[in-house]
Image: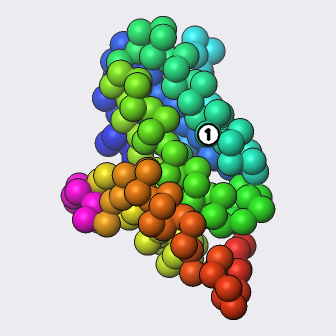
Amino acid sequence: MFNFLEPALNDPNQGIYLCGPEGEASRFLDYLAANAGRDVRADVTERRIILGHGDPDADQQLQNLLDPLRELCDRGFSPVRVVGPAAWGVMGYAAPEDFLWYESRVLPGIEDLEAVAVMCTYDAARLPARALVYGALETHTHTIIDGVLSESPSFMPADRYLKMRLVHLPWLEPGEERPLTR
């Protein structure tokens, strides 16, 4: 994560948006400051670094992401780098499909913004396998696994994802049980 954000820390023309469940953005900021070896609070005060927060409502969660990105882009920051953890069940989504809908809408939501790079972090030890397959691999064009950047062979564009995956999730089919979330 630091390698992804470090160029923006060292370039006043770049913006950063940190987001996630309650407290995650602040935790990321502390991590950045420690690794950069400098205080970054002035960047937050000047809104070159914006700390976001999640929401259990998937529509609001998407808005919480897009509004700060538009602000940073409108203010001329380029590129804008985004880091946020995928938090299946942690954000309080009513159902896993809400989380997957949100994940599938991020790329279409930013396609009209200039120079935005998003890194979604997934904790493979904490998330169910379905979150990794349906959320990470199928809704993201690229993956970084063990430091290696690759195109995701499982990626589905948002319209195809909605038609082929989201409305046919196994637990939404008759007779299937809803997966447990943490």
> In this orientation, which residue lies closer to the viewer: 64 or 171?
171
* Extreme residue in the bottom direction: 175
Q: Residue at x 49, y 35 (%)?
A: 109
Residue 62 visible to the viewer: yes
| Amino acid type of the residue that numbered disc 1 sits on in the rendered structure | Leu
Against 134, is 115 above or below? above
Q: Which residue is mark 1?
A: 62
Expressed as whole percent of the image width and height from the top left, the position of residue 60 reads 71, 39
- Asked whether residue 147 is drawn in magenta, I would say yes
- Asked whether residue 136 is drawn in magenta, I would say no
Against 172, is 116 above or below? above
Q: Quadrant of residue 11?
A: top left
Expressed as whole percent of the image width and height from the top left, the position of residue 110 reads 44, 32
> In this orientation, which residue lies closer to the viewer: 139 or 175?
175
Look at the image and name its color scheme.
Answer: rainbow
Label 1 sits on a secondary structure element that is helix
With 67 as the anchor, is 75 left or right in this view? Answer: left
> In this orientation, which residue lies closer to the viewer: 102 or 127?
102
* Extreme residue in the top direction: 75
Expressed as whole percent of the image width and height from the top left, the position of residue 69 reads 52, 25
How many C-alpha atoms fall within 10 Å of the one at disc 1: few (<14), some, or many (≥20)?
some
Against 119, is 166 above or below? below
Give the position of the C terminus as an image quadrant: bottom right
Q: Quadrant of residue 126?
A: bottom right
Q: Residue at x 41, y 57 (%)?
A: 160
Residue 29 visible to the viewer: no
With 104 as the anchor, is 62 left or right in this view? Answer: right
Expressed as whole percent of the image width and height from the top left, the position of residue 15 reads 44, 22
Q: Residue at x 39, y 32 (%)?
A: 111
Over which residues does the magenta segment extend?
146-153
Q: Residue at x 41, y 15 (%)?
A: 77
